[in-house]
Each structure stands twice: as structure tokens, then as C-alpha cells.
Amino acid sequence: MKAVVFRGIGDIRLENVREPRLEEPTDAIVRITASAICGTDLHAIRGTLSGMENGTVLGHEGVGVVEETGKQVRNLKPGDRVVIPSTIGCGYCSYCRAGYYSQCDHANPNGPDQGSAFFGGPKSSGPFDGLQAEFARIPFANVGPVKLPEEVGDDDAILLSDIFPTAYFGAELAEICDGNSVAVFGCGPVGLFAIMSAQLRGAGRVFAVDTIASRLDKARELGAEVIDFNREDPVEAIREATGGIGVDRAIDAVGVDAVAPKKGPAARNAKDLRETFARERKKVAPKTRPKNGNWEPGDAPSMVLHWAVEALAKAGTFSVIGVYNEGVGLDIAGAMEKNLTLKMGNCNHRRYIPKLLELVRSGAVRPSEILSHRQPMDRVIEAYKAFDRREPGWIKVELEPELKAA
């Protein structure tokens, strides 16, 4: 079968690999009908997500049709359409039973202290081959995959696999409630869904911070008040718009590959942080392989962490759902002086998918309005490169596997 394979930092390939087989009685084999490219995949290729193993199939977003099940998978049968949660949970440990599927004690074969188990990730996460393939083995399939109703198509369903639940999780961590003012840093796919999620939770105003025009345009379409950090200092703009108080809640939807402003007042105000950013970048990405304008790590890993702490009102809440690596600092003193609440983590996808799926089924939300491109698998490398370069209009890419003839 064809799959997108990680071969090293700055090196991904579309290859023919062996089809997966059932390994445990709780496994299922799913024929993938849609997958997607995520910013976390880019972290791995840029070198800011360490520990990736050569030969790992990439991708942690998937929708498909069940082909085969293990004998302990009692809730699915061949032919069922399912959305696959990005993180993997056993369903029976104390964490899963409390809804913390991303902190499962049993899913990660490296042990309960090694963090979240998820598809297409580094060695510390399993590793598990990912979902940018024609077929995938789904561990704990008796718990993870959620059956899809006929009226929810792949274009909407693929966004329920990771980014919509992650964004909603971020809004929940931020403790957003009716009337709150919210700053969302980053208007990539997760940031756009964070805007939508903040509104679902009753936010009064949402400020969206980015610098890519097409992403800011989409954020404005969703009703956010947009701030281009290469034109304005986002902290100053937010304070001015809130009477000098700051926002009640902030969501970091960027993570370790943040970039510093290149011009305008924000660039001048961030000048003192350049040495800090340089040290952080060396720690988070000791090995990089930029090539022809691609796979370049962000040059300001903690930029958003600084902005958010400064932009929040006293006693505000800061939610971090962007991916970070070791070596990135947070202004703890500034957060403490303002009595901020800090909440962060990997999304417990299986906890949120049923609720969000019902919103989609009812027509209350249409996730596919965030989808910008659909690409066949034979164009996946070009799609990765365009998404990595943040080319205008490239917001979220759905991949359509080329399936072999029956």
C-alpha cells in the first residue's frame, strides 16, 4: 500500500509499505478514505518534535471504513464508517475512565510515564504507524473509533479526528464562559477552530493574532477581531481594545514553531528577546535540514508565551494547546504576579468527538468551511511543502488515498 513515510528531518517520502495486520484482539484494520496534514506533522519534519524514528508512517487524522476486527472488538463490524481519534486510550485505566484518554496508562508501550500515545508520532509516543496511508491498524478499536452517521461526509468528519476536538479542549481549558474576551494566538486550522469553539462557549469578543493574510481573512469571516503582528504589537492592540485591562482568556494555538515579528512596533518591542529565542531554538531543534524554502523551524519558540502572559488581564486563564519541546521558557514571574491560571495538555480526543459529531450532524457546525485543499495521495509531498511554507490560502489539507482496485 502507499503511505507517507518519515525518513529523517527534512525528508518525507511516498512509499509502498506492507499492509498492516491485526496484532491484538482489540485491534481493527481500517481502510482510510480521508486523512489530513497537521502542524504537528510539520514539527516532526522540521526537527522541533524530537525522537521520530526512520520508517514511521506519518499522520494522526483519519476517517475510514472498518475492514477487519479482532475478537474483542464488539462494537464495530466490517463496513462501518468511523472517525479515528488522534490519541489512543485503553478505555479501562483510571485516566481513561475519567475522560483523560491522552494520559492512558496502557496505550503507550513505553510505559505510563511516557506521555500520550498517538498515531504517526515519535518513539516516546509508541511509536504507532500513522494514518496517511491506504490502511491502518487501530489499537484499542473497541474504545477509540466513533461510528459516523451517513449524513456526515468525510470532509467534515476528518476535522473531528484531531483539530476540532483539540481546539474545543483548548477553549475548555481556558474556562471560557458567557461574555468573556478571548485572544487566540495563531490562525492556522487549530486556531480557527479555537475561535469557533470560544464562540460555542459564549465568548463575547474574540481577538485573532497572526500575520498571514488568508488566515486572518478566514478568522474575520468567523467573527474574530483580527490583529496582524507585523503591523501592530498584539499586546498593545489588545490592551487598547479592552480599555487597558487585557483579555480574560488566551489560547496558544501556535507552539514551538512560532515566528518573531519582522517589522512594525512588535518587532521593536521583541528586540530584547532575540538572544532568548536563539538559545531556545538551538535546544528545541539541534538538528535541522531546511531545503529550498521548506522545513525551517520557527525562530521565536516562546514568542506566544510572552505575548499571552502580557495580554491577559489579572486573574485571567491561559490555555496552551500548541506543541512544545524541552528548552522553551515561560514568564512564570509575570504569570504569578498577575494571578494567572495556566492550563495545558494533549487533547483527550475520544472524550469530545461524540459531542462535536452531534453538533455537525445537526447542522449547528460545519467544520469543512475550514478545509482549503483536497489533494490525492500522489501529490502529498507537494501539498506538505505548500502547507509548510504557509502559502496564501493553504489552511487545511485533506488527503485522499489512492486505493488499489478490488
Image: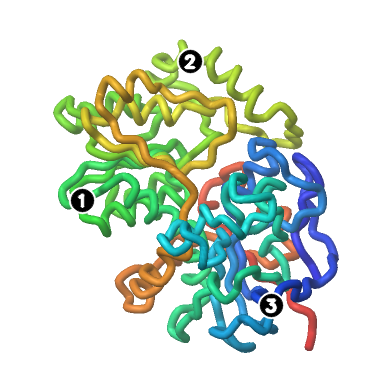
Is disc 2 placed on a helix, strand or loop? Answer: helix
| Distance (Cα) linking label 2 and label 3 | 52 Å
Pick the quarter of the image with the C terminus: bottom right
Q: Is residue 192 above or below residue 154?
A: above
- Closest to the observer: 95 or 6? 95
2 vs 3, front mark:
3
| Disc nearer the start of the sequence (2/3) | 3
| Distance (Cα) linking label 3 and label 1 | 43 Å
Label count reads 3
Is disc 3 placed on a helix, strand or loop? Answer: loop
| Disc nearer the start of the sequence (3/1) | 3
The label shown at residue 273 is 2
Q: What residue is shown at x 84% (from left), y 65% (from top)?
A: 17
Task: Name the quadrant containing residue 226.
Answer: top left
Q: Judge from the rendering whether residue 39 lies leftward or rightward of residue 242; answer left or right.
A: right
User: Badge 1 is on which residue?
Assistant: 177
3 vs 1, front mark:
3
Task: Name the quadrant containing residue 279.
Answer: top right
| Distance (Cα) linking label 1 and label 2 | 33 Å
User: Badge 3 is on which residue?
Assistant: 25
Whether pointer 2 and pointer 3 mark residues with C-beta atoms closer than 8 Å, the reply is no
Task: Name the quadrant containing residue 221.
Answer: bottom left
